[in-house]
Image (cartoon, rainbow, N blue to C red):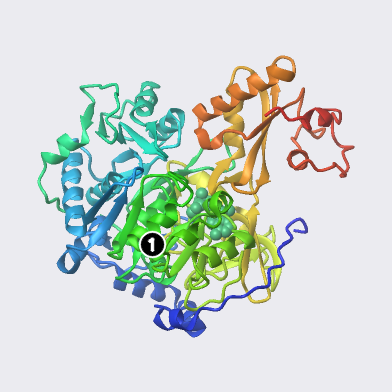
């Protein structure tokens, strides 16, 4: 474990302000400790009580945690509920006219929709889905821009027990195809296009291309939301306009009561092999995690105006846009556009305009906004803010301090939330009225979440020290399976050496106060702008190009994106030089854009006649990482089969 050492020596501490602490749902360290103690004394009782308090069950559960088929854990298994009922219907009696969504379009146009209106739209759309033959357990792909419709589509699936799989609009037709096939979808919901930063984005065209690739015979219908009015190809026997089918339906749709373990959704994420994993979440446990964390970490109150900037294509947009806030009856802002359009003051302008009180975004956005307009927040009235949050990657202390001072005016606690697609909800994060903050640390695990740091064989590391981040006990919102691949699920998250511990795939260390500091991934997964990308996935995409013989991808630290992607490529023919190299590099970048999506395009490509390998043929990635950073190679390269290659791989082409 000697390679996992922390370099951070941050010592500043920020205690909750008195006023915040006194008003907080969980107040003071004693409040936090009391919850942790309750969970320790009776783990299942703790979660069962919360599940009864926070969720409306159609049939109450009698079993809490079923461990008989571990690691395929089951929570609240004999209970029945509906997620959409819990997110919408249960607010209708008291809060029907409360605004649920404040949608701000790319061009600044605003649409408000109340819980009552949301209920009608979800019911109508759910009825329309039923008419197309969609029902319990059917998989539906959602490929939409950020919109009210995206949330309506997800909620409508949940209402009828269909399982949605949202694909981020930035993924290519090829990636979309892969997911349609893997999940066995029957229907796709998309838009003609989207608008981001004043520019149109085509979506329907990608759906057409994906479906034409074959293997999608199960897709009977494509529902198209008309967002931009751009010209699109139309398959009359297959395509349906959203507005036409929605308007034909009635305002009420009876929710389908599902078992707590019924999959609510499947969301694909990258792992350390070439194919993405379909992370399968439950209904009951998942919803409970989203609700409890909204209350504990965001200290969410009925009066809050809440804004999470994540796209529904990621887990954050599921737990903290489409489900958590609605389950709490929140008023939330939903934003179609990008933080830098029309300028880098957009977020702050929107905070002012909508009087946002809880604001949740990613470190990469914060860093880019510092760079593009570090003083822009000062031009806006941000006095409505009371809590800030971050997610996706470690936040560097400088960015933390800027967020704290310039955005939060030293008034707002910052919740640095560590979690994953697989964990479903926050795992390590400060309860802001209870926990002192240290810039750069996600602080301490949530009550009822039992985290540890261990050696590679699962041995607990006592006190301070670095190692593998693990979860010791199953928790309600945990991943249930990898869709169609239980063996991969077991191997990836519950490897035998760890004897039942959940392996997060991150390394971390704990300081003398028991605070966790995340150091980064231990597998071949990159974190680019808070998005997870598997190096193998990008390598496979490159190797699929007819020019390419071999490729290796590594990450390099990047001041805004966290990590950038460096590709080492061996072509089938000669190693290209000069303008040739530039042209081919540009072609390959575009190729990856088409194979996976623009987010996976390498920032830099270097060509070699070969890759540095050990005599046994293993690519020496550590060496490639050093080369990418421009470091002198001081380590022993005598085991290297072809040391002369290193000179070539130092040269960058663009
Ligand atoms: C990986 C999970 C959870 C939603 C967004 C990303 C990294 C996430 C933090 C944080 C340090 C973080 C980890 C984790 N990560 N949040 N607050 N501090 N690292 O979800 O795509 O599933 O990625 O993101 O490496 O394993 P994801």
**Which quadrant of the view contains residue 583?**
top right
Instruction: Indicate left or right for 543 with 330 as reference.
Output: right
Q: Where is residue 222 in the image (x, y as percent from the top left)?
A: 27, 31
For this rendering, which residue is in front, 619 or 598? 598
Asked whether mark 1 lies closer than 8 Å to ligand 1, one says no
Does any portion of residue 284 appear in the rendered image?
no
For this rendering, which residue is in front, 630 or 496? 630
For this rendering, which residue is in front, 63 or 547? 547
Instruction: Indicate left or right for 83 with 639 as reference.
Output: left
**Which quadrant of the view contains residue 535?**
top right
Q: In this view, does 30 lie above or below 283?
A: below
Give the residue pinned by disc 1: 290
**Which quadrant of the view contains residue 21?**
bottom left
Q: Position of residue 547 (x, y in %)?
A: 63, 17
Label 1: how many Cα within 10 Å (few below 14, some 14–19, many 20+):
many
Q: Is residue 601 above or below residue 147?
A: above
Residue at image location 72% in from the left, 67% down from the top: 9
Q: In which quarter of the image is ligand 1?
A: bottom right
**In the picture, which quadrant includes the N terminus?**
bottom right
**In the picture, which quadrant includes the C terminus?**
top right
Instruction: Indicate left or right for 586 with 85 as reference.
Output: right
Residue at image location 51% in from the left, 34% down from the top: 598
């Amino acid at each position: 474990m000697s390679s996992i050492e922390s370099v951070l020596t941050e010592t500043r501490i920020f205690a909750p302000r008195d006023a915040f602490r006194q008003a907080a749902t969980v107040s003071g360290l004693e409040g936090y400790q009391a919850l942790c103690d309750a969970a320790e004394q009776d783990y299942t009782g703790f979660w069962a009580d919360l599940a009864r308090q926070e969720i409306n069950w159609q049939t109450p559960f009698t079993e809490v945690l079923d461990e008989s088929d571990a690691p395929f854990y089951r929570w609240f298994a004999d209970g029945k509920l509906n997620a959409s009922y819990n997110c919408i219907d249960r607010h209708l009696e008291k809060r029907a006219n409360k605004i649920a969504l404040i949608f701000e379009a790319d061009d600044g146009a605003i649409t408000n929709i109340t819980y009552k209106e949301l209920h009608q739209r979800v019911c109508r759309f759910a009825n329309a889905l039923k008419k197309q033959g969609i029902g319990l357990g059917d998989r539906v792909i959602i490929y939409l821009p950020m919109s009210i419709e995206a949330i309506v589509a997800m909620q409508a699936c949940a209402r009828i027990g269909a399982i949605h799989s949202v694909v981020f609009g930035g993924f290519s037709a090829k990636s979309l195809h892969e997911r349609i096939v893997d999940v066995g979808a029957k229907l796709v919901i998309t838009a003609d296009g989207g608008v981001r930063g004043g520019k149109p984005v085509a979506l329907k065209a990608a759906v057409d291309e994906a479906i034409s690739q074959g293997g999608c015979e199960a897709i009977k219908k494509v529902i198209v939301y008309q967002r931009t009015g751009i010209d699109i190809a139309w398959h009359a026997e297959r395509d349906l306009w959203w507005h036409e089918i929605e308007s034909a339906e009635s305002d009420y749709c009876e929710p389908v009561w599902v078992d707590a373990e019924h999959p609510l959704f499947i969301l694909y994420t990258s792992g350390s092999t070439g194919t993405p994993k379909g992370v399968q979440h439950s209904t009951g446990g998942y919803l409970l995690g989203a609700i409890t964390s909204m209350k504990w970490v965001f200290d969410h109150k009925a009066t809050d105006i809440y804004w999470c900037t994540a796209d529904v294509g990621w887990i954050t947009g599921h737990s903290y846009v489409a489900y958590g806030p609605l389950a709490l009856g929140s008023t939330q802002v939903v934003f179609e556009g990008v933080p830098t359009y029309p300028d880098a003051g957009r977020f702050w302008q929107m905070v002012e305009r909508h009087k946002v009180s809880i604001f949740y975004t990613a470190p990469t956005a914060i860093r880019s906004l510092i760079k593009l307009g570090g003083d822009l927040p000062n031009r806006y009235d941000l006095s409505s803010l009371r809590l800030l949050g971050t997610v996706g990657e470690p936040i560097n202390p400088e960015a933390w301090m800027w967020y704290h001072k310039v955005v939060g005016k030293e008034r707002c606690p910052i919740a640095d939330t560590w979690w994953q697609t697989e964990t479903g909800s926050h795992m390590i994060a400060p309860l802001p009225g209870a926990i002192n903050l240290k810039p750069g640390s996600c602080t301490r695990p949530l009550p009822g979440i039992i985290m540890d740091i261990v050696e590679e064989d699962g041995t607990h590391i006592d006190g301070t020290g670095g190692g593998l981040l693990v979860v010791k006990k199953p928790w309600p919102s945990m991943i249930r399976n990898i869709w169609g691949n239980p063996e991969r699920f077991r191997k990836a998250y519950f490897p035998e050496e760890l004897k039942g511990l959940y392996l997060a795939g991150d390394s971390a260390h704990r300081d003398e106060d028991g605070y966790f500091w995340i150091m980064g991934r231990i597998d071949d997964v990159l974190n680019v702008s808070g998005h997870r990308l598997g190096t193998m996935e990008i390598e496979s995409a490159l190797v699929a190009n007819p020019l390419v013989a071999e490729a290796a991808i590594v990450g390099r630290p990047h001041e805004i994106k966290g990590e950038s992607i460096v590709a080492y490529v061996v072509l089938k023919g000669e190693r290209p030089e000069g303008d040739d190299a530039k042209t081919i590099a540009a072609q390959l970048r575009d190729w990856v854009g088409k194979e996976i999506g623009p987010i996976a395009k390498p920032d830099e490509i270097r060509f070699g006649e070969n890759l540095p390998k050990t005599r046994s043929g293993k690519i020496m990635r550590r060496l490639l990482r050093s080369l990418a950073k421009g470091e002198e190679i001081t380590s022993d390269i005598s085991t290297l089969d072809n040391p002369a290659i290193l000179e070539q791989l130092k040269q960058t082409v663009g």
